[in-house]
Amino acid sequence: EIVLTQSPGTLSLSPGERATLSCRASQSVTSSFLAWYQQRPGQTPRLLIYGSSTRATGIPDRFSGSGSGTDFTLTISRLEPEDFGVYYCQQYSNLPRTFGQGTRVEI
Amino acid sequence: EVQLLQSGGGLVPPGGSLRLSCEASGFNFRTHAMTWVRQAPGKGLDWVSDISPSGASTGYADSVKGRFIISRDNSKNTLNLQMNSLRGEDAAVYYCAKHLTGWDVFDIWGRGTMVIVSS
């Protein structure tokens, strides 16, 4: 099983600042099969990024993903108030599919 | 509008069984893989199981293998999760989710249904 470790656990930032979230895999994620989701309080998860760097439909371009192998990054270039919540990475190169434990972004 | 309407959660004693359902609308259900993901109160996301568009191929997390069975009825646009031998650690909100075409990522999610395991 591929274990995903996200850091930091919590990020406290102000609107307009840049957020950098990390996701490290216990073994290489084949073909960059890594996705990112946002979950706002009381809401269902929302797909942001897949294939390490492809934005899902309707996702603003302030969200960007990068990385390969075992190290991946989600960057929010200029935080908006609606960006608070918990962000999860997910790998889908191997079964079982696994999620990271999440990074909480506090605005 | 693409929707996933979930039903079937509730309270069940340890060792009991429960069946969750997820009715899809607004997209061609038979051409998409589907997934179940759960989230214990205050915890992160935990992938449970998925099924191919035809239903011929399934996958399970080790924690539920041999106890849960995923299935689908493409004639009724319905995804199911039969949960047997339930344990306290199975208590969670269970989400069904649709796979993005061609990818094993989840672009549409149901609202979730709560499963409580308690005597």
Image: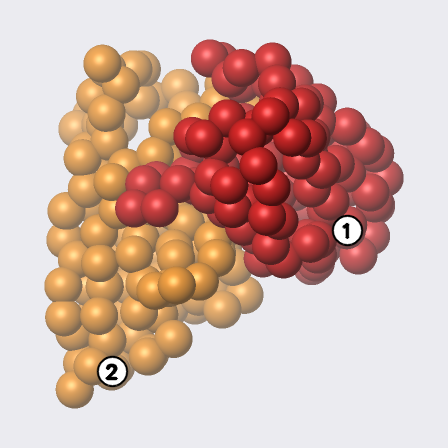
Q: What residue type is disc 1 on?
A: Ala
Q: Colour of chain B?
A: orange
**Left or right side of A91 for B36:** left
Question: Residue tagged by mark 2?
Answer: B14
Question: Residue tagged by mark 1?
Answer: A25
In the rendered image, the quadrant that contains the C terminus of chain B is: bottom left
Q: Are marks 2 and 1 in contact (CB under 8 Å)?
A: no
Badge 2: residue crowd in 10 Å (few <14, some 14–19, many ≥20) = some
Closest to the observer, A39 or B111 = A39
Report which quarter residue B78 is drawn in: top left
Compared to A74, does A61 lie above or below? above
In the rendered image, the quadrant that contains the N terminus of chain B is: top left
The location of residue A19, given as percent across then percent down, is 67, 35
Residue at image location 29% in from the left, 56% down from the top: B93
Closest to the observer, A40 or A94 = A40
Residue at image location 40% in from the left, 19% down from the top: B31
Q: Which chain is red?
A: A
Asked if residue A66 can be seen in this view, the reply is: yes
Residue at image location 23% in from the left, 75% down from the top: B117
Closest to the observer, A22 or B11 = A22
Q: What residue type is disc 2 on?
A: Pro
Residue at image location 83% in from the left, 45% down from the top: A70
The location of residue A36, given as percent across then percent down, is 59, 35
Closest to the observer, B31 or A85 = A85
Asked if residue A103 can be seen in this view, the reply is: no
Q: Identify the element where label 2 is drawn.
A: loop
Compared to B116, does A95 lie above or below? above
The location of residue B8, given as percent across then percent down, is 14, 53
